[in-house]
Image: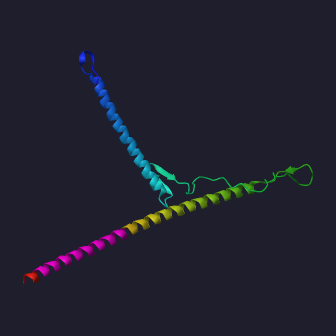
Amino acid sequence: MARGVGGQSDVREVSTAVAASRRSRLLQAVLAAAAIIALLAFVHVLRPGASEVTVASGTLRTLDSVPDGRMPPPVPAGPAAPAPVAQDVGNGDDVTPVDDDDSDSDEAEEQQQEEQQQQDQFDETQEQLQTDEENEQQAEQDSEKQAQKQNDEAQQQVDEGLQQAEQDEIDAGQ
């Protein structure tokens, strides 16, 4: 313990040491809690069949889940498409460009169909997860009923055994 002037202990140093010790213990507790939460979340992610993890304010998706956002169309493997060519109407002076509105609307329709497919797949996945959860709950309820039934049967056997023992005592006493 530190001594101040005249051999008296320095109260400030002692209270600072106590406060530092308390802060150290508090920091250890906070870090331990955070580590436990992270471990539980990690274990939940690794559970077979789980494709989403719900966190306090949102949903995190694992790598095997379907993305919600737009995905760019696949790049064709073949040569690049040629640029639109101006068409000659016959008199040599008038040149009109090719109308690309049809291809733009086709692309927009394809993109819309693709988004709809993604949404349908996402909905299907959500329904499957809900069904799986309901099945899991039903299985748990069935398991609890089975355990209760087994407990009841065991209790009945114990009661029958006690009754038989009492009857044997009565018979032996006569």
Residue at image position (36%, 69%) is 143
Residue at image position (42%, 52%) is 40
Q: Is residue 150 inside the magenta stretch?
A: yes
In which quarter of the view is residue 120 placed? Answer: bottom right
Q: Is residue 46 above or below residue 128?
A: above
Image coordinates for residue 68, horizontal then vertical, percent: 57, 54
Q: Is residue 152 inside the magenta stretch?
A: yes
Q: Is residue 99 left or right of residue 152?
A: right
User: Which quadrant is the N terminus positioned in?
Assistant: top left
Q: Nearer the viewer, residue 4 or 32?
A: 4
Q: Nearer the viewer, residue 21 or 141?
A: 21
Q: Nearer the viewer, residue 106 or 75?
A: 75
In which quarter of the view is residue 116 placed? Answer: bottom right
Give the magenta-colored segment's residue range: 141-169
Q: Is residue 169 left or right of residue 23?
A: left
Image coordinates for residue 26, horizontal then vertical, percent: 34, 38
Image coordinates for residue 32, horizontal then vertical, percent: 38, 44
Q: Is residue 104 left or right of residue 115?
A: right
Image coordinates for residue 24, horizontal then vertical, percent: 35, 35
